[in-house]
Image: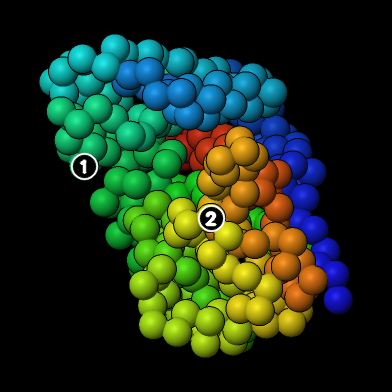
């Protein structure tokens, strides 16, 4: 068996086209969805992520503001900037690129964002809404992973889904979204004893640990759908995921590559959340 490759780039373009229709409908009413992205400091990876987000907004004709603050910006100054964006009617989504410098409390920053403009889905109110199953702004990476499964026709209801990783950004919300779709969900971590016992039983396997190639082909159930959220840079400069792609693709039924799998969907769902926030504000 050779797995079918889940082309995140192609699916992202398809999903963006769907949301552009909704964005254009708002623009016809005189409302242009607006996203403000704040970056504090000079983190190279963050710069790349932010540039990609601004580019995605431009593709859909959204208004975007790219706010760059120096690494020595005070917490009070950042919070003041967020307060101004909260009050700005042309801004529907606010994103503060993490990580922020150590002298700034990231929890305080995330809580300062108006929950209705929290397009990252990290505000405690939106996390709570996700727990009870009625959030309108889901965290973008697990939201994108769910959309990949949907677009590939992977059945979720009644299946055993195993999530390896328990972060607030991916692992926990991913598990909640799979539960909402009636999967039986097991959450593991990189420290789970006999991890392979769980992963081999997964019809759907989502891996987000930040450990390069930790899941190998012999740890995967034949025919499983494998969603690799990890992205790691190897000594030779190449990128790889948390799944050993070469061995896994010989066993899995579906698999995401790294890069080109979940990554494009994360940015796509950020745009989707921005449009949805604008629709909500328009009502």
Up the image or down, 110 lies above or below 158; here it is above
Residue 155 image position (x, y, % from top left): 70, 76
- Residue 51 coordinates in the image, percent (x, y): 55, 21
Mark 1 element type:
helix
Is 5 positioned to the left or the right of 103 in the image?
A: right
Q: Which residue is mark 1?
A: 107
In the picture, the quarter occupied by the N terminus is bottom right
Residue at horizontal 40 percent and vertical 46 percent from the top? 121
Q: Residue furthest front?
A: 235
Q: Tell me residue 5's x, y (percent).
A: 80, 58
Establish if 126 lies above or below 218: above
Q: Secondary structure at mark 2?
A: loop
Look at 17% across and 35% down and name the residue there: 105
Q: How many marks?
A: 2
Q: Residues within 10 Å of mark 1 (few under 14, many from 20)?
A: few
- Inspect this view and state whether residue 190 appears: yes
Q: How far apart are the two marked residues, 1 and 2, measured between alpha carbons?
A: 28 Å
Residue at coordinates 38% horizontally, 18% vertically from top-left? Answer: 42
Q: Residue at x 27, y 17 (%)?
A: 71
Label 2 packing within 10 angstroms: few (<14), some (14-19), many (20+): some
On residue 212, the disc is: 2
Left or right of 105: which side holds 227?
A: right
């Amino acid at each position: 068996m050779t797995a079918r490759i889940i082309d995140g780039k192609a699916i992202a373009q398809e999903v963006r086209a769907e949301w552009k229709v909704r964005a254009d409908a708002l623009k016809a009413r005189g409302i242009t969805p607006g996203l403000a992205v704040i970056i504090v400091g000079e983190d190279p990876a963050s710069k790349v992520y932010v540039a990609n987000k601004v580019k995605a907004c431009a593709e859909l004709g959204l208004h975007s503001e790219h706010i760059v603050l120096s690494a020595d910006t005070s917490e009070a100054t950042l919070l003041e900037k967020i307060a101004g964006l909260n009050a700005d009617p042309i801004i529907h989504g606010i994103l503060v690129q993490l990580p922020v410098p150590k002298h700034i409390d990231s929890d305080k920053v995330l809580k300062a964002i108006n929950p209705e403009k929290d397009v990252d889905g990290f505000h405690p109110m939106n996390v709570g809404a996700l727990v009870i199953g009625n959030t309108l702004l889901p965290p973008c990476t697990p939201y994108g992973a769910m959309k990949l499964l949907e677009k590939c026709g992977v059945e979720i209801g009644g299946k055993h889904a195993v999530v390896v990783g328990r972060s607030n950004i991916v692992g926990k919300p991913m598990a909640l979204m799979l539960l909402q779709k009636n999967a039986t969900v097991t959450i593991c971590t990189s420290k789970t004893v006999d991890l392979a016992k769980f992963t081999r039983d997964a019809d759907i396997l989502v891996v987000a640990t930040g450990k390069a190639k930790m899941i190998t082909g012999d740890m995967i159930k034949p025919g499983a759908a494998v969603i690799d959220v990890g992205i790691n840079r190897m000594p030779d400069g190449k990128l790889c995921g948390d799944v050993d792609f070469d061995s896994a693709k010989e066993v899995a039924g579906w698999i995401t590559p790294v890069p080109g799998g979940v990554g494009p969907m994360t940015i796509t769902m950020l745009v989707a959340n921005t449009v949805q926030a604008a629709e909500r504000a328009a009502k």
